[in-house]
Image (cartoon, rainbow, N blue to C red):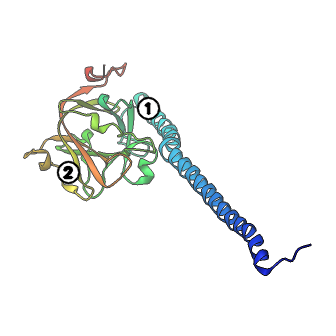
Amino acid sequence: MGVTTDQDERTAASPSARGRGRGRIALAVSVFGELLITAGLVLGLFVVYSLWWTNVIADRRADHQGDKVRDHWAAEKDSGPGALDTKDGIGFLHVPAMRNGEVLVEKGTSTSVLNDGVAGYYTDPVKATLPMTGRAGNFTLAAHRDGHGAKFHNIDKLKKGDPIVFETKDDWYVYKVFAILPETSKYNVKVLSAIPKEAGVKKPGHYITLTTCTPVYTSEYRYIVWGELVRVQKVDSERTPPKELG
């Protein structure tokens, strides 16, 4: 039996120590990798929730509210006209270029309103002029670009000359797009003015303004579309839509 020196013992022990060190590093890398995968899954689920599931929920709420508005109109048809009721909604926006069907319009532009998958008319900082009043002014509207129904997601598809139609109980208001501002500050309230000079107009008229966030999936700026009323068509017994929606 030979003699074992201290140097031999240290040499024999070194591979084992190195193995333990590599094992700890491998474990740390494995744990870190699993954490990254978990974080990715959580982020992915959040994106799905934000961009898909909120749309599903918002569309359901909007459909329910829209049905209530039409039921209310039908009841008024039998009982005669009454005061304007803005509780459930005042009408429906139809924009063929955006390919999103009808959009219920309600009072206000807070997230609690817009998150229900509707468009809202401004009450602050500049109050919208509702077309039903017959007064000159600007019918200013906002809706989400993504998530919560994303009713104005395709606002960038609108071109000059495209129709925008607002449906109420008694009338169809037909507007034509005449100006577009692809990007402006979210604090630019001049775009909501009764006479929207940033759209190039200088005199009172019957205008409509659509506003939403831009770029898509951010809220840094605002995308603006202006239209001007070209005619009002009375609603008939069949609620036949104007030719622009045919």
Locate residue 106: give its quadrant: top left
Identify which amino acid the numbered label 1 is placed on: Arg
Residue 135 image point, x, y percent: 19, 43
Q: Nearer the viewer, residue 112 or 74?
A: 112
Q: What is the spatial separation of the Cα atoms under label 1 and label 2, in whole angstroms?
A: 31 Å
Residue 192 image point, x, y percent: 22, 51
Identify which amino acid the numbered label 2 is placed on: Val
Q: Number of marks in the image?
A: 2
Q: Is 69 above or below relative to 9?
A: above
**Of the two numbered discs 1 and 2 in the rendering, the one whose residue sits closer to the viewer:** 2
Q: Can you identify the residue that label 1 sits on?
A: 70
For image coordinates 42% across by 50% down, the residue present is: 113
Q: Nearer the viewer, residue 195 or 147?
A: 147
For image coordinates 26% across by 53% down, the residue present is: 127
Residue 30 image point, x, y percent: 65, 57
| Residue extending furthest toward the right | 1
Is 213 on the left or on the right of 196, as rendered? right
Q: Is 9 above or below relative to 57?
A: below
| Residue extending furthest toward the front | 2
For image coordinates 36% across by 36% down, the residue present is: 91
Give the structural element (helix, strand or loop) at label 2: helix
Q: Is 79 above or below relative to 17?
A: above
Residue 191's disc number:
2
Image quarter of the N terminus: bottom right
Is 176 on the left or on the right of 144, as rendered? left
Give the structural element (helix, strand or loop) at label 1: helix
